[in-house]
Image (tube, grey):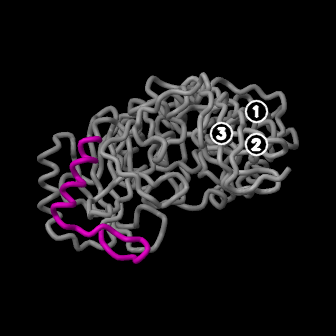
C-alpha cells in the first residue's frame, strides 16, 4: 500500500544515517526522521515520499529510546548547528564507530577489518575553539546571530551556545547589541545589500586568547575603529579585532582580504608542545584536545626513529607537520593555499624547527614532480578525499607507510580500496576520533603499510 505525503505512520527507529537522522522502516519503505534515536517509537508525518524511501518528521513520541537525553540547548530541536544533542554521548560514540565500520566494509570492501573504539577526550560540550555565526534581522529589526534552522534558511537566534568554548558566550550576546546601537546594516543575501555578513569568534583553548572578526561586504563601516578599541578594552582575553571583506554572492564565509583594526591579527595556541599563530580564516581543528590526542596515537603508531623523510600532503598551517618534524630527519609540507603555507613557515620559524620545507601547489601535481620516496606520507585531504592521480602517484612511488586522516569516512573507504586493491598496501589500523561531539561527523585516521 503506497503512502502519501502528509500521512501519519507509526515506526520504530532502528538506526542512524551518516547525516545524523534516525532511520526506521514501514513495510518496504525506509523512513528518515531527524531528532530521533534508535529505540524511539514514534508517530511521524511523511514529508517527501519516493518509491523506496521517505523523509518524515516526528508528530508524537510514543515511547522514548533509553538512549534519549534532554538536550543542553533550548533551541537544539530547531538549530542546525548540532544533530545529536538529544542522544546520550556514549551512544553517539557507538553510532560513530558503526558508521566507520559500515563504510569500511561496504564501500571499501574490507569485510574483516577491525576498527578501534572512537577516541574521545573529556568534554562533549563547550569544546569548540571557533564559532562563525551568520547575522540576520528579526521582524522587529533586532540584530540576530545564530545558525540556520535544519533544512532551511531561517536563522535561529542565539545568545549562547553550549558546544562552543563557554568563554566566547559573552561576546556573542554583547557584540550583537553593539552592532544594533551602531546602526550598521546587516547583509541581505537575497538583495546582495547591507554590510555585515558574519560574526566569527576564535579562542586558544590553552592560552585563552580570543579573536573577533566581522565579515563585511565592503570596508566602509563608520566608527568601526573606535568600536574595535572598545571591544579590546571590554574583553581582557581579546587580542585582536579584524575585518574580513567578502563582496561576492557566495556561500563561502570568508573573502580573500583581512584587515586588523585593533590588537594583532592572530591568536596564539599551544598544541603538541608547540605554539601556533592562528589567524581569523586559518583552518585549525575545532577540538584542540582531541586533535592532540589523535596526534599522540599517530606518533606512537609511527614510532619514528629520527632518520625518516616525512611528507605531509594537504599540510595547512603545519598543525601535524611541525610536531612530527621534530621526530624525523626531514619533513616536507605540500599545500594548495599560499596563505596557509606562509603561516606554516611563520609557525616553523616561531618554534625554531629548521628541518622542514613547504611547497605551494596542487598535491597531485607536487607528488608526481617529487624525485624522492618518503618513508612516511601523511594525507589529510578535504572532504571529497584524494584526487585519483594522488592515489596513482602513491602506488607508483610506494612510500613504506601512509597515514590517511579523513573527515569523511565514505571517501576514505573509497581511497583505501584503491590503495589496497592490488595487494600492494594493507591496512594496519583504523582509529576514529570524535572531533565533533553532538554531530554526526567523525574523524578517522587509517594507518596503511607497504606489503612485503
From the image, tell me which residue sits under label 1: 427
In the displayed orientation, state which residue is furthest to the right.
422
From the image, tell me which residue sits under label 3: 43
Corner quadrant of residue 194: bottom left
What is the number of the mark on residue 196? none
Q: Are marks 2 and 1 in contact (CB under 8 Å)?
A: yes
Q: Residue at x 27, y 59 (%)?
A: 143
From the image, tell me which residue sits under label 2: 416
Marks 1 and 3, how far apart at CA: 44 Å
Q: Residue at x 48, y 25 (%)?
A: 121
Q: Is 423 located above or below residue 230 in the figure?
A: above
Q: Position of residue 334 (x, y in %)?
A: 56, 53
User: Which badge, 3 or 2, comes first in the chain's sequence?
Assistant: 3
Corner quadrant of residue 145: bottom left
Q: Position of residue 402 (x, y in %)?
A: 68, 38
Q: Residue at x 17, y 43 (%)?
A: 235
Amino acid at each position: 500500500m503506497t503512502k502519501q505525503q502528509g500521512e501519519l505512520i507509526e515506526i520504530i527507529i532502528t538506526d542512524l544515517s551518516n547525516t545524523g537522522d534516525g532511520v526506521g522502516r514501514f513495510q518496504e519503505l525506509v523512513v528518515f526522521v531527524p531528532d530521533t534515536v534508535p529505540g524511539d517509537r514514534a508517530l511521524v508525518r511523511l514529508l517527501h515520499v519516493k518509491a523506496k524511501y521517505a523523509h518524515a518528521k516526528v508528530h508524537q513520541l510514543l515511547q522514548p529510546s533509553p538512549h534519549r537525553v534532554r538536550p543542553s540547548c533550548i533551541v537544539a530541536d530547531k538549530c542546525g548547528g548540532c544533530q545529536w544533542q538529544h542522544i546520550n554521548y556514549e551512544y553517539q560514540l557507538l553510532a560513530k564507530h558503526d558508521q566507520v565500520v559500515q563504510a569500511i566494509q561496504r564501500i571499501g570492501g574490507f569485510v574483516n577489518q577491525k576498527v578501534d573504539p572512537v577516541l574521545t577526550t573529556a568534554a562533549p560540550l563547550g569544546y569548540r575553539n571557533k564559532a562563525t555565526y551568520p547575522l540576520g534581522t528579526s521582524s522587529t529589526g533586532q540584530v540576530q546571530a545564530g545558525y540556520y534552522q535544519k533544512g532551511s534558511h531561517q536563522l535561529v537566534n542565539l545568545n549562547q551556545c553550549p558546544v562552543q568554548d563557554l568563554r566566547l558566550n559573552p561576546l556573542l550576546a554583547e557584540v550583537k547589541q553593539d552592532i544594533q546601537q551602531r546602526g550598521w546594516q546587516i547583509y541581505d543575501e537575497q538583495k546582495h545589500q547591507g554590510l555585515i555578513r558574519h560574526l566569527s569568534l576564535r579562542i586558544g583553548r590553552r592560552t585563552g586568547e580570543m579573536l573577533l572578526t566581522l565579515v563585511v561586504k565592503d570596508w566602509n563601516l563608520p566608527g568601526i575603529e573606535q568600536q574595535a578599541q572598545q571591544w579590546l578594552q571590554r574583553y581582557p582575553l581579546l587580542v585582536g579585532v579584524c575585518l574580513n571583506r567578502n563582496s561576492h554572492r557566495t556561500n563561502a564565509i570568508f573573502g580573500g582580504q583581512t584587515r586588523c583594526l585593533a590588537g594583532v591579527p592572530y591568536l596564539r595556541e599551544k598544541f603538541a608542545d608547540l605554539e601556533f599563530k592562528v589567524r581569523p580564516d586559518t583552518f585549525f581543528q575545532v577540538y584542540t584536545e582531541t586533535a592532540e590526542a589523535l596526534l599522540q596515537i599517530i606518533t606512537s603508531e609511527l614510532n619514528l626513529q629520527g632518520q625518516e623523510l616525512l611528507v605531509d600532503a594537504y599540510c595547512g598551517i603545519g598543525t601535524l607537520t611541525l610536531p612530527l618534524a621534530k621526530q624525523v630527519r626531514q619533513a616536507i609540507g605540500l599545500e594548495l593555499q599560499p596563505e596557509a603555507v606562509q603561516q606554516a613557515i611563520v609557525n616553523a620559524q616561531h618554534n625554531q624547527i629548521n628541518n622542514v620545507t613547504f611547497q605551494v601547489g596542487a598535491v597531485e601535481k607536487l607528488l608526481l614532480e617529487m624525485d624522492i620516496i618518503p618513508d612516511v606520507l601523511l594525507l589529510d585531504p578535504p572532504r571529497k578525499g584524494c584526487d585519483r592521480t594522488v592515489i596513482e602517484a602513491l602506488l607508483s612511488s610506494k612510500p613504506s607507510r601512509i597515514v590517511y586522516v579523513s573527515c569523511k569516512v565514505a571517501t576514505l573507504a573509497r581511497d583505501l580500496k584503491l590503495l589496497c586493491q592490488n595487494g600492494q598496501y594493507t591496512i594496519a589500523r583504523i582509529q576514529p576520533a570524535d572531533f565533533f561531539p553532538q554531530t554526526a561527523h567523525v574523524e578517522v585516521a587509517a594507518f596503511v603499510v607497504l606489503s612485503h
